[in-house]
Image (spheres, rainbow, N blue to C red):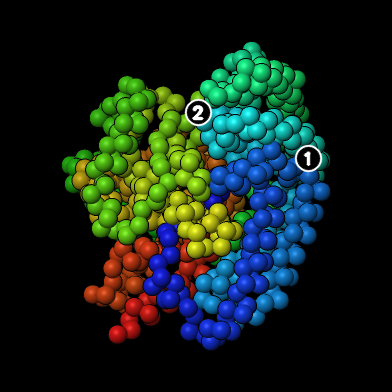
C-alpha cells in the first residue's frame, strides 16, 4: 500500500506561528530561499518517483519508470537525499515562521528516513503477493486506474513505461537470485500466492490480455492512423515483451525461487531482519516505539475492545461465548444478502447518503475532488483488500474506493459502514483530497503520505459513525468494534511474527480467537503482514495518537472545544509525522485558551 489536508484558514496559519518565531521581517528574509529549496526538492523528487507524479495528476513523467531495484538508482537516491538534508540543515530553523518550521521538520524526516532505509537490502526481495510492481503495473494497464489514456501522447507514454517495466522485472529476477544465495528470500507460502497472479498475465490471446484494455477504449477523436499504429504497437509489446516477461518470472518462481524460499514467517529470519524491523517500525509509525512496547500495547487494546464486544453480544441476546458469536457472524445469512456485485456497491452508496446530513457538523471543509465506488479488477480481486486510490490534484480524476467481491454470495456486510468511513468518507478521501487541494502548502507536502497519519486518521474516523448517524444497527456497531479489534490484533501478530518467533499458524489462531473476520480473510491478512512487515502497525498507533490529542483538547478547552475546528487542525497542514502533529495541536490548544 502501500503506502500517500484541508485548505489552511488564515486563522489557523496565525495559530501555527511558533512562540519562538523571530520578528516578521526576519522570517520573511529566509522564506524565499527556503521556498526555492522546497520547490526544487519537489521537482527532482517527482522525476525520481514518477509514479507519485502520475498519482498526483502531474503527467510530465508518465513515460518514466525508474529501475528501483538497481544499484544505480539506489545510488542516485543516496545522493539526492544527502544533498537535500545537507542543504536544509544549513538553515537556522529558529528563524523560520511556524509553518516553515513544519516544512523543515517534515523534509528533514523525509531525508533521514530514506537514507536509513537505503542501508537495508529490501531490493533482494522485490516480489510478493500484496505490494509488488507486477500488481501495480497490472492495475495501471487496466486503463481505468491512475495512468491516463486520453491522448495519443498518453498511449505512447505507457508504451515507454512498459519497456522500463520489462527491464525492472529482469532486475528483480537477478536480485532474487542474489537473495537466494545470501539468505534474503520471502516465506514460501507468499511466493506461492504470486504464481496465480502471474498466471493471469503470462499467456494470450493478446486481444484478451489485461494490457490490451487501453486499445479497447480509444477516445473518439483519435485518427484512424493513430488507432492503427497504436493497436499494432500494443499488440507487439504484449506479444513480444509483456507475456514473455511474466512467463519468465512465473517460471522462475515455480522452478527456482519457491523451492529456495523459507518456511519461517518473520523477517527476523533474514540476516539483518531484527534491525530492519526496527527501521520499519519507525518508517510506518513515525515513532521510536520498540517492538516489545507495541506488542504489549496491542494486547492491552485487545483486552479493552473484547469487553466492548461482550456488551454488544449481550445486547443482541446471543447465547454463547464471544468466539461462538464470531462464528455465528461469519455465517449469518442476514449479513450476506447480496446476489449481484452491483448490490454491494449500491449498499455503500446508501451508507454515504445516510451520513451526508451530519458531515457538516463535524467538518468545516469538504473536498472538491469527485468520488467513485468501483469493484476491484478481477485479476487482483482474490487477494486484494478494500482500498482507496486518490484522485488527481486538479480534480479531473476522481478518488476511487475499490471493493473486492470475489464471491458475492459470500460477501459479508458486517463492517460495511465502518469500511466506508475508513476508506472513503471522511477517511482517506477527505484527508488525501483536501491535502492535494491545499495550494497554500509547499508542493512536496501536497503529495506526502505517512502511514501512521493517513491510516491513523482513517481508523479514527471509524469511531465517528454514531456522530454521523450510522451504527444504529448493533451489528454494524459490532462491525466497527471488529475493525478496531482487527487493527489492535495487528500490533500483536505483526510484532509477534517478526520479533517474538510466532509462526503463521499461531498468528492465524490468535486472530481467529479474537475477531469475527472469516478464516480466509484472516489468512490473507496474516500473509499481508508477512509480506510488508511493520505497515500494519501504523493504523492503531496513529489512531491512538489522534484520539489522545482529541481527548487532551477536550479536557484543556472545555466549552471552547469545537470538533470541526479540531478536525481542521488535524487535516489542514497535510500529512506529517505524529510528533509534528502533536506539537501543532498543543500549540493550537494554547492559542485557543487565550482570551
| Identity of the residue drawn at 40% across and 41% down | 371
Q: CA distance from mark 1 to mark 2?
A: 29 Å
153 to 454, vertically: above or below: above
3 to 340, vertically: above or below: below
| Identity of the residue drawn at 42% across and 59% down | 6
The C terminus lies in quadrant: bottom left
| Residue 541 point in image, percent of width and height | 47, 59
| Residue 7 point in image, percent of width and height | 43, 60
| Identity of the residue drawn at 48% across and 40% down | 397
| Identity of the residue drawn at 53% across and 83% down | 24
Whichever of labels 1 and 2 marks the residue nearer the N terminus, that label is 1
362 to 428, vertically: above or below: below
Give SS at disc 2: loop
Where on the picture, by quarter, is residue 90?
Answer: bottom right
The extreme top residue here reads 205
Q: Mark 1, mark 2: which one is toward the viewer?
A: 2
The residue singled out by tag 2 in the image is 377
User: From where the camera sits, is residue 37 visible?
Assistant: yes
The N terminus lies in quadrant: top right
The residue singled out by tag 1 in the image is 175
The 10 Å Cα crowd at callout 1, few under 14, some 14 to 19, many 20 or more, is many
| Residue 169 point in image, percent of width and height | 73, 34
Amino acid at each position: 500500500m502501500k503506502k500517500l489536508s484541508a485548505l489552511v484558514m488564515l486563522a489557523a496559519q496565525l495559530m501555527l506561528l511558533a512562540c519562538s518565531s523571530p520578528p516578521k521581517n526576519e522570517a520573511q528574509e529566509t522564506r524565499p530561499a527556503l521556498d526555492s529549496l522546497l520547490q526544487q526538492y519537489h521537482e527532482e523528487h517527482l522525476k525520481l518517483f514518477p509514479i507519485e507524479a502520475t498519482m498526483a495528476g502531474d503527467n510530465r513523467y508518465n513515460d518514466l519508470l525508474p529501475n528501483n531495484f538497481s544499484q544505480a538508482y539506489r545510488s542516485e537516491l543516496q545522493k539526492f537525499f544527502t544533498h537535500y538534508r545537507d542543504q536544509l540543515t544549513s538553515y537556522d530553523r529558529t528563524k523560520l515562521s511556524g509553518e516553515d518550521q513544519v516544512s523543515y521538520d517534515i523534509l528533514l524526516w523525509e531525508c533521514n528516513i530514506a537514507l536509513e532505509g537505503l542501508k537495508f537490502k529490501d531490493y533482494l526481495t522485490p516480489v510478493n503477493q500484496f505490494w509488488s510492481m507486477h500488481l501495480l503495473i497490472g492495475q495501471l494497464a487496466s486503463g481505468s486506474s491512475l495512468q491516463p489514456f486520453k491522448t495519443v501522447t498518453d498511449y505512447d507514454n505507457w508504451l515507454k513505461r512498459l519497456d522500463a517495466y520489462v527491464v525492472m522485472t529482469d532486475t528483480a529476477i537477478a536480485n532474487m537470485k542474489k537473495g537466494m544465495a545470501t539468505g534474503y528470500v520471502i516465506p514460501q507460502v507468499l511466493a506461492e500466492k504470486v504464481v496465480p497472479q502471474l498466471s493471469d498475465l503470462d499467456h494470450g490471446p493478446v486481444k484478451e490480455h489485461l494490457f490490451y484494455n487501453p486499445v479497447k477504449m480509444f477516445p473518439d477523436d483519435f485518427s484512424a492512423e493513430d488507432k492503427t499504429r497504436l493497436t499494432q504497437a500494443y499488440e507487439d509489446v504484449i506479444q513480444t515483451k509483456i507475456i514473455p516477461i511474466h512467463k519468465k518470472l512465473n517460471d522462475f518462481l515455480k522452478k527456482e525461487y519457491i523451492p529456495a524460499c523459507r518456511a519461517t514467517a518473520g523477517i527476523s529470519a533474514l540476516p539483518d531482519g531484527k534491525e530492519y524491523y526496527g527501521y520499519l517500525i519507525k518508517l510506518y509509525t513515525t515513532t521510536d516505539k520498540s517492538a516489545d512496547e507495541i506488542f504489549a500495547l496491542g494486547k492491552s487494546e485487545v483486552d479493552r475492545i473484547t469487553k466492548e464486544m461482550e456488551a454488544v453480544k449481550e445486547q443482541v441476546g446471543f447465547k454463547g461465548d464471544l468466539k461462538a458469536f464470531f462464528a455465528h457472524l461469519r455465517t449469518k445469512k442476514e449479513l450476506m444478502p447480496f446476489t449481484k456485485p452491483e448490490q454491494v456497491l449500491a449498499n455503500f452508496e446508501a451508507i454515504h447518503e445516510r451520513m451526508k446530513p451530519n458531515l457538516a457538523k463535524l467538518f468545516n471543509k469538504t473536498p472538491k475532488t469527485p468520488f467513485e465506488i468501483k469493484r476491484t479488477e478481477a485479476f487482483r480481486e482474490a487477494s486484494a483488500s478494500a482500498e482507496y486510490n486518490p484522485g488527481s490534484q486538479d480534480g479531473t480524476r476522481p478518488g476511487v474506493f475499490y471493493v473486492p467481491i470475489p464471491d458475492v454470495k459470500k460477501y459479508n456486510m458486517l463492517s460495511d459502514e465502518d469500511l466506508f468511513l475508513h476508506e472513503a468518507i471522511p477517511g482517506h478521501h477527505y484527508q488525501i483530497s483536501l491535502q492535494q487541494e491545499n495550494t497554500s502548502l509547499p508542493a512536496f507536502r501536497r503529495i506526502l503520505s505517512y502511514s501512521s497519519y493517513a491510516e491513523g486518521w482513517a481508523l479514527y474516523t471509524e469511531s465517528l459513525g454514531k456522530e454521523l448517524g450510522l451504527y444504529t444497527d448493533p451489528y454494524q456497531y459490532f462491525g466497527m468494534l471488529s475493525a478496531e479489534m482487527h487493527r489492535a490484533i495487528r500490533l500483536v501478530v505483526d510484532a509477534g511474527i517478526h520479533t517474538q518467533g510466532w509462526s503463521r499458524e499461531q498468528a492465524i489462531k490468535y486472530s481467529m480467537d479474537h475477531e469475527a473476520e472469516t478464516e480466509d480473510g484472516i489468512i490473507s491478512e496474516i500473509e499481508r503482514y508477512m509480506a510488508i512487515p511493520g505497515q500494519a502497525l501504523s493504523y492503531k498507533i496513529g489512531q491512538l495518537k489522534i484520539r489522545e490529542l482529541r481527548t487532551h483538547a477536550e479536557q484543556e478547552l472545555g466549552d471552547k472545544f469545537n470538533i470541526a475546528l479540531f478536525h481542521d487542525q488535524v487535516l489542514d497542514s497535510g500529512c506529517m509525522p505524529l510528533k509534528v502533529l502533536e506539537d501543532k495541536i498543543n500549540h493550537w490548544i494554547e492559542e485557543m485558551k487565550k482570551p
